């Protein structure tokens, strides 16, 4: 890519003003609370008093990364828009998550979804799941950090390493010092700023096409069916209507609420009604962002389809297409690059801060505090240290991304693939009371190993979807021409069938396989009546009604009472912890003694 034009004072002014605004909110809330004791709820859930609208904005800001702003636009340009068919699946996915799964966690007053897994299955399954999540999500955060740093160093001429460190430190500082409340309110500002990047692309393409002496070719001959209406049932590609709407369903469940980052926002709401407002509001905003990125990609198609920058030799990879357009066309627009970069950096910092806070919550709640006694005086320092450590690890990984690019892409692919087994674990926990720890653990481990094998084979075989056909018909005369590679001319991988299954379909199949094998192994290992009743206390009442209606739980004489939030004082709860008996007895007493009694016992023993 050619060297960027000189950056103007307007670019610097807009970039630093918007970035300082978003960071200033987080830092202000962080330092305002310094010196005050903050308990676990305040640090990780904002004392459960955050408004639903703010949480909805935070959910979107956390989900839309810098990789998405650049990578999704490039993906849509190269492969089409079929992944946008996930949008119709948001409504049933949202109903499933916000009415049957997350309300159980909300009423249990939990901090993380892994805390629920420890209650439901025991420490082994919960801790193993949380550690896998920690490793995979660290890679996502580091890659997003690197993407924003590349744009920042390219436009401003800064060192790449310094850019990564500055972005990582900025996101980690207010997260470690201020907790979730600082993260959420900073996210609100960052969400508004980050949409400026795709808007800037769309607006500039419209402006350039109107002002250009030779405007781009009209789109009336574009084959829209190839881009977004392929309806064949092909399990080897994600670029069909069915893959986007059905195959990607486990991935969307993670994005809508099963991911710890989103779960925390739901649990931080003032009430269950506000939590659902946050969830469905977040879905609406996420749809808006998806469509906005789609329009940005459509703008790139309109501008480059007759002078493809990769085919012309101007860039070497399609993920450079957005920075290339910014570099080539932004010099005449004062402040344009500063606005674009501010949106990109805001998306990156929001992702970093959200992942750091969720990691600190997981490490403190699920790994450290159950095994290491921590006094109230030291708990605040421990939580800050855990958040800082997570941020440091992410920065170090971000610095390594240029050297482990292939490994980073592999872990990103594995993170997407792991959505299937993890969604299967959650579905078993909430909807199938017969599922026990042994059956679920064996099934999930086996399927996850199979998923690693499939992802590795697909990654090494370089199997990918077909590409859209572009040309060089309207390039300037001095452009070096290269041969155009048509989608039909690409040689399809003909090896092992397992490697040919696309990521979305593989995610769906692995999720279903986890559920089926988990049930089979659980039934084979035996699920005593007491354990089934205990599991029902940790699920939605609708689950019990459904199974009774079809005749599976008629041996249970009366409706299972839900576990209710507990009015007991902290010292009473601590006293109760020293007098725990077996699961069934404690479950029977839970309706009288409340949440914490059942929580403390199951966290130690699990429903096995």
Image (tube, rainbow, N blue to C red):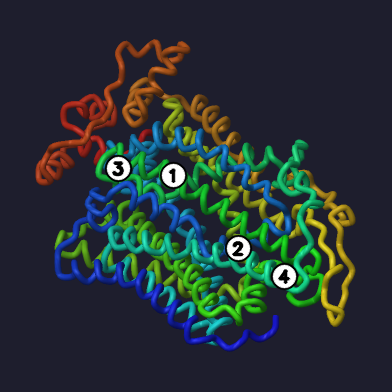
Question: Please, what secondary structure does the residue beneath circle 3 have?
Answer: helix
Q: Between disc 2 and disc 4, whose residue precedes?
A: 2
| Mark in front: 3 vs 4 | 4
Q: Residue at x 45, y 49 (%)?
A: 259
* C-alpha distance separating marks 1 and 2: 30 Å
The residues tagged by marks 3 and 1 sit, at their Cα atoms, a distance apart of: 26 Å
Label 3 vs label 1, nearer the camera: 1
Read off the residue under disc 1. 257
Q: Residues within 10 Å of mark 1 (few under 14, many from 20)?
A: many
Q: Quadrant of residue 184?
A: bottom left
Marks 2 and 4 sit apart, C-alpha to C-alpha, by 21 Å
Tell me whether circle 2 and circle 4 mark residues in contact (CB < 8 Å). no
Of residue 154 and residue 550, the one placed in the foreground of this image is 154
Reading the image, the residue beneath label 3 is 604
State the separation of the CA atoms marked 3 and 2: 54 Å
Residue 396 image offset from top left, x and y in percent? 48, 75
Q: Earlier in the sequence, mark 3 or mark 2?
A: 2
Q: Position of residue 17 (x, y in %)?
A: 39, 77
The disc, 3 or 4, on the residue closer to the chain's N-terminal end is 4
- As helix, strand or loop, the secondary structure at mark 1 comes to helix
The residue at the point 67 percent across, 75 percent down is 324
Q: Which of the two discs, 3 and 1, labels the residue nearer the N terminus?
A: 1
Q: Which residue is mark 2?
A: 202
Residue 317 got which mark?
4
Q: Is residue 229 visible?
A: yes
């Amino acid at each position: 890519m050619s060297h960027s034009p000189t950056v103007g004072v307007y670019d610097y002014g807009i970039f630093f003003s918007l970035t300082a605004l978003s960071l200033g909110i987080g830092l202000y809330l962080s330092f305002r609370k310094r010196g005050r004791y903050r308990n676990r709820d305040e640090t990780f859930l904002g004392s459960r008093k955050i408004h639903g609208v703010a949480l909805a904005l935070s959910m979107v800001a956390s989900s839309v990364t810098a990789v998405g702003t650049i990578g999704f636009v490039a993906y849509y340009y190269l492969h089409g828009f079929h992944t946008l068919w996930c949008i119709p699946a948001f409504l049933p996915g949202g109903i499933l998550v916000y009415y049957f799964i997350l309300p159980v966690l909300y009423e249990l007053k939990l901090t993380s979804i892994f805390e629920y897994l420890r209650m439901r299955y025991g420490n082994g399954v919960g801790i193993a799941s949380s550690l896998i999540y920690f490793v995979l999500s660290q890679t996502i955060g580091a890659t997003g950090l690197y993407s924003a740093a590349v744009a920042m160093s390219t436009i401003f001429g800064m060192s790449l390493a310094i850019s990564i460190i500055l972005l990582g430190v900025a996101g980690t500082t207010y997260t470690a010092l201020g907790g979730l409340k600082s993260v959420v309110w900073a996210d609100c500002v960052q969400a508004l700023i980050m949409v400026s990047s795709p808007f800037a692309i769309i607006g500039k393409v419209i402006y350039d096409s109107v002002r250009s002496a030779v405007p781009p070719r009209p789109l009336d001959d574009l084959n829209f069916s190839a881009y977004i209406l392929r309806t064949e049932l092909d399990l080897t590609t994600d670029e069909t209507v069915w893959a986007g709407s059905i195959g990607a369903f486990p991935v969307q469940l993670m994005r809508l609420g099963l991911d710890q980052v989103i779960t925390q926002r739901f649990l931080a709401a003032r009430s269950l009604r506000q939590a659902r407002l946050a969830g469905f509001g977040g879905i609406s905003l996420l749809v808006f962002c998806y469509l906005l990125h789609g329009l940005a990609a459509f703008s790139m198609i309109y501008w480059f389809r007759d002078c493809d920058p990769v085919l012309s030799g101007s860039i070497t990879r399609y993920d450079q297409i957005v920075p290339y357009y910014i570099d080539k066309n932004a010099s005449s627009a004062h402040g344009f690059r500063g606005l674009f970069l501010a949106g990109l950096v805001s998306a990156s910092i929001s992702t970093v801060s959200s992942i750091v806070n969720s990691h600190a919550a997981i490490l403190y709640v699920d790994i450290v505090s159950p095994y290491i006694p921590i006094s109230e005086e030291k708990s605040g320092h421990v939580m800050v240290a855990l958040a800082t450590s997570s941020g440091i690890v992410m920065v170090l990984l971000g610095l390594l991304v240029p050297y482990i690019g292939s490994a980073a892409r592999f872990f990103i692919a594995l993170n997407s693939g792991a959505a299937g087994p993890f969604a299967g674990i959650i579905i078993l926990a909430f909807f199938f009371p017969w599922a026990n720890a042994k059956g679920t653990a064996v099934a999930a481990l086996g399927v996850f190993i199979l998923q690693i094998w499939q992802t590795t084979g697909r990654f090494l075989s370089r199997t990918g979807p077909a590409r859209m056909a572009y040309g060089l018909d309207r390039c300037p005369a001095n452009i070096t021409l290269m041969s155009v590679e048509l989608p039909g001319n690409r040689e399809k991988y003909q090896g092992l069938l397992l490697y040919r299954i696309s990521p979305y379909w593989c995610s769906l199949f692995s999720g279903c396989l986890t559920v089926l094998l988990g049930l089979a192994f659980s039934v084979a290992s035996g699920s005593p009546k007491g354990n089934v009743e205990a599991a029902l206390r940790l699920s939605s009442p609708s689950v019990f009604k459904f199974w009774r209606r079809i005749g599976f739980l008629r041996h249970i004489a009366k409706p299972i009472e839900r576990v209710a939030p507990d009015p007991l004082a902290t010292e009473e709860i601590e006293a109760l912890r020293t007098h725990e008996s077996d699961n069934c007895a404690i479950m029977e007493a839970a309706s009288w003694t409340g949440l914490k009694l059942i929580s403390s016992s199951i966290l130690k023993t699990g429903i096995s």
